[in-house]
Every structure is written in structure tokens, then in C-alpha cells.
Amino acid sequence: MKTVNNVALLLAAVLLLPLAILASDNNQRSVDIADPVQVGNVHLKAGTYKVEWNLPGPKVEVKFLQHGKEVATAPATVKTHDRQISQDDFETHKNSANVSVLDEIDFAHGHDALVFTSHATAS
């Protein structure tokens, strides 16, 4: 009887693993930032970043990681939109110091986006 329970438990774990992996991909993306940008009071250099956020949303804390190291965090709101784009799209504006400030990231091949609020912290 114990063997049957163990096999059933193992089978359940194997069946649920792909769902867990799929779910974890929904709150992280890799993005290429072409030009330096400010998120809150943190300046991000051009480069590739892993962007992660906590679920379920819509209000989330976003982490920017580069080379496995967290370089900034920022509050944001997760939103969905009707259009699907072929590459990541970044919306920015220039502040009074003429610095590009990140307002939004629309992710490619999906309907989700992160809209940033004005404060961020360095890590």
C-alpha cells in the first residue's frame, strides 16, 4: 500500500512539474535595453537584463538582474493589452535633466506589459 501511495505521489509531481515551469515563465523575461535608461532613481546601462516580478499583481515589485546580480528594483503595475508585438517595446520620457526615464515595457509575443511608477531602489 505504501508503494502505491509513493507511486501516486511521484506521478502527481511529474504531471505538475510542467505547469510549475510554465507558471514561473509568466513573471520573468529577458530584455535588451539599447540605451541607458532611468527607472525611478536608478540608472541602468544599455545591456541585457532579466526582469522578474512577483505574482499575482497587478501591483508588483520588479527586479532587474544582470549577470545574475540584482541591480535595481522598481514598483510597477502589470497590464494586458490587445495587441501582440514581435519585439519588446520600451516607452520612455525625458525628465527635466534630459535623462530617459523608463515608463513601460511591452513584451514581445505576448499581451503583457509592466508600467513603472516613479520610484526605484538600487540593490
Image: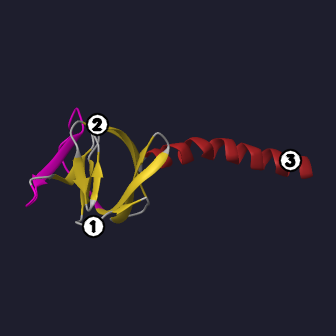
Decide which of 18, 63 is in the foreground and name it. Answer: 63
Is 84 contained in the magenta span? Answer: yes
- Residue at 26%, 62% (x, y): give it: 41
- Amino acid type at circle 2 is His
Q: Which mark is residue 119?
A: 1
- Amino acid type at circle 1 is His
- Residue at 27%, 43% (x, y): give it: 107
Image quadrant holding the C terminus, namely: bottom left
Q: Does the image show residue 114?
A: yes
Question: Residue 10, percent across and down?
Answer: 76, 45
Numbered disc 2: secondary structure = loop
Query: Residue 109 lies in what quarter of the image?
Result: top left
Q: Nearer the viewer, mark 1 or mark 2?
A: 1
Q: Is residue 75 left or right of residue 35?
A: right
Q: Does the image show residue 80?
A: no
The tag earlier along the polypeptide, 1 or 2, is 2
Numbered disc 3: secondary structure = helix
Distance of label 3 from label 1 (alpha carbons): 54 Å
Q: Neighbour class for label 2 at 10 Å: few (<14), some, many (≥20)? A: few
- Amino acid type at circle 3 is Val
Decide which of 117, 45 is in the foreground and name it. Answer: 45
